[in-house]
Amino acid sequence: MFSKIKKADVILLIVLVLLGAGLSLLSASAGSAGQQVEVSVDGQPYGTYSLSEDQTIEISHDGHTNKITIKDDTVQMTYSDCRNQICVNDGSISQTNQSIVCLPNRVVIEITGKEEKYDAISN
């Protein structure tokens, strides 16, 4: 039923484990330090806040309440009246392209970099 494990099988396993570990490290280090917190509710922009300014924002929408806390250059969903509390248990985020989502209340928190505007220079 089971055949012998061959040398090529062991080498393939080692290569796949190393490749997986490398991709995981690359994915984890892809973000850079964020500058802004963008909040959207029900797909619509709610507000943009500086990640460097400590504050608590209460979001009330359609009878639901969420609170986010920005502190020490991180943001965290500190309160939600949803049943599953996954968004509250996600912890804090601080890197670009990270997000916290409260699906039942339709609240999305995203970390972005500082927006830079470029002017075209013509000769």
Image (cartoon, grey):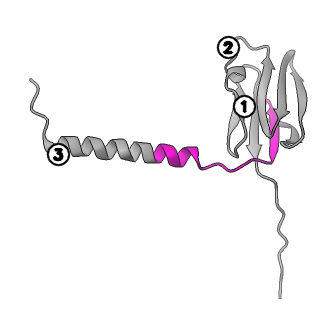
Kindly identify the residue that appears in the image at 87 percent across and 15 percent down: 63
Q: State the residue position of label 3.
A: 8
Above or below, comparing residue 79 to residue 6 in the picture: above
Determine if the magenta segment contains residue 33: yes
Kindly identify the residue that appears in the image at 41 percent across and 43 percent down: 20
Q: CA distance from mark 3 to mark 2?
A: 46 Å
- Element class at badge 2: loop
Number of other residues with Cα within 10 Å of mark 3, as a class: few under 14, some 14 to 19, many 20 or more: few
In this picture, which residue range is highlighted in magenta? 23-43
Number of other residues with Cα within 10 Å of mark 1, as a class: few under 14, some 14 to 19, many 20 or more: many
Q: Give the x, y percent position of residue 80.
A: 79, 17
**Three-letter code, disc 3:** Ala
Instruction: Identify the mark nearer the N-term, 2 or 1.
Output: 2
Q: Image quadrant for the C terminus?
A: bottom right
Number of other residues with Cα within 10 Å of mark 2, as a class: few under 14, some 14 to 19, many 20 or more: few
Q: State the residue position of label 1.
A: 92
**Three-letter code, disc 1:** Ser
Front residue of 33 and 60: 33
